[in-house]
Image (cartoon, rainbow, N blue to C red):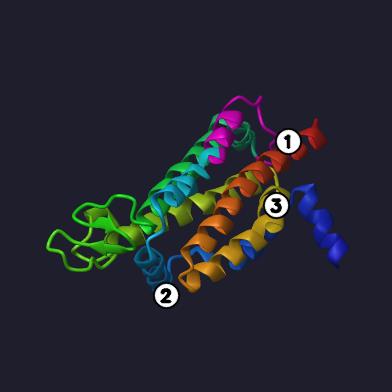
């Protein structure tokens, strides 16, 4: 049974995509508890250098975007209708997906760690508003783009972009692409989530940065491997 599933995945069957959705949905869809965990991270206020390095961990996604844009026509399932195959072969489509992931990640994590201080200033380890009172992350005291309502928007945007990395290559090339990208890297994501849930901002930054870097390289490797297999 397992051998059949593995063979179907690497042969390009999109039938495993619903299983991937079920596996990743609870972890990346924004839940109220997730927003509360973000508030803990923001309250602990990582050093500015750590925040900057965290955002720079998205640079590999930008590199992946440029690499995808420079690729020759991509592989597409031969059983797809010709017009759909034509779209699936567009390297620009894959580059767009990569660019959206990079953009959404920058926006979401920038708000998550309160990169734009607005009326709040970093004074030692405490965030204080213009009135001198402690600043409450994601409240009306904070920068408009850091408020709870916007953080939910950024998270949903990020979720949609991550989902596109499963749907597009999974539908056009086969389930092996998202499986090959997400599965080996998933421990980094879940370890980072544990640190996030505990409000340990530096541990979260380290492990989630590793997730960004690893998934970017894994995506390139999975796509290149598929292209080589079908060439």
Furthest toward the left, the residue is 131
Q: 10 Å neighbourhood of mark 1: few (<14), some, or many (≥20)?
A: some
Mark 2 — residue?
Answer: 33
- Callout 3–callout 2 Cβ contact below 8 Å: no
Residue 82 magenta:
no
Query: Which comes sooner in the sequence, label 3 or label 1?
Result: 3
Q: 10 Å neighbourhood of mark 3: few (<14), some, or many (≥20)?
A: many
Which is more toward the observer, 44 or 89?
44
Mark 1 — residue?
Answer: 224
Residue 63 magenta:
yes
Query: Residue shown at 27%/62% (left/top)?
Result: 127
On the rendered image, what quadrant is the C terminus found in? top right
* Residue 17 in sight in this render: no
* Residue 127 in sight in this render: yes
Q: Which mark is residue 175?
A: 3
Which is more toward the observer, 204 or 26?
204
Q: Disc 3 vs disc 2: which is toward the camera?
A: 2
In 3D space, how far apart are the residues under numbered discs 3 and 1 (Cα atoms)?
14 Å
Which is more toward the observer, 13 or 228?
228
Query: Residue shown at 49%/38% (left/top)?
Result: 99
Q: Position of residue 65 (x, y in %)?
A: 55, 34
Query: Which comes sooner in the sequence, label 1 or label 2?
Result: 2
| Residue range of the region highlighted in magenta in the rendering | 60-80
Query: Residue shown at 58%/45% (left/top)?
Result: 168
């Amino acid at each position: 049974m397992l051998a059949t599933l593995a063979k179907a995945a690497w042969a390009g069957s999109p039938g495993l995509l619903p299983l991937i959705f079920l596996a990743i949905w609870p972890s990346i869809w924004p839940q109220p508890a997730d927003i509360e965990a973000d508030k803990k991270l923001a309250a602990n206020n990582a050093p500015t250098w750590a925040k900057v390095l965290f955002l720079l961990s998205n640079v590999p996604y930008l590199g992946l975007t440029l690499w995808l844009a420079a690729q020759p026509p991509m592989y597409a399932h031969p059983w797809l209708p010709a017009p759909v195959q034509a779209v699936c072969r567009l390297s620009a489509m894959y580059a767009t997906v990569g660019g959206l992931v990079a953009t959404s990640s920058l926006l979401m994590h920038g708000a998550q760690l309160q990169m734009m201080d607005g009326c709040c200033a970093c004074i030692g380890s405490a965030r204080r508003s213009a009135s001198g009172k402690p600043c409450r992350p994601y409240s009306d005291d904070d920068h408009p783009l850091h408020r709870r309502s916007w953080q939910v928007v950024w998270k949903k945007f990020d979720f949609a972009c991550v989902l596109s990395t499963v749907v597009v290559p999974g539908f056009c090339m086969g389930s092996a692409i998202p499986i090959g990208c997400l599965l080996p890297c998933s421990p980094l994501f879940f370890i980072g989530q544990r640190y996030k849930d505990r409000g340990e901002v530096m541990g979260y930054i380290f492990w989630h940065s590793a997730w960004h870097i690893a998934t970017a390289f894994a995506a390139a490797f999975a796509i290149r491997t598929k292209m080589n297999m079908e060439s």
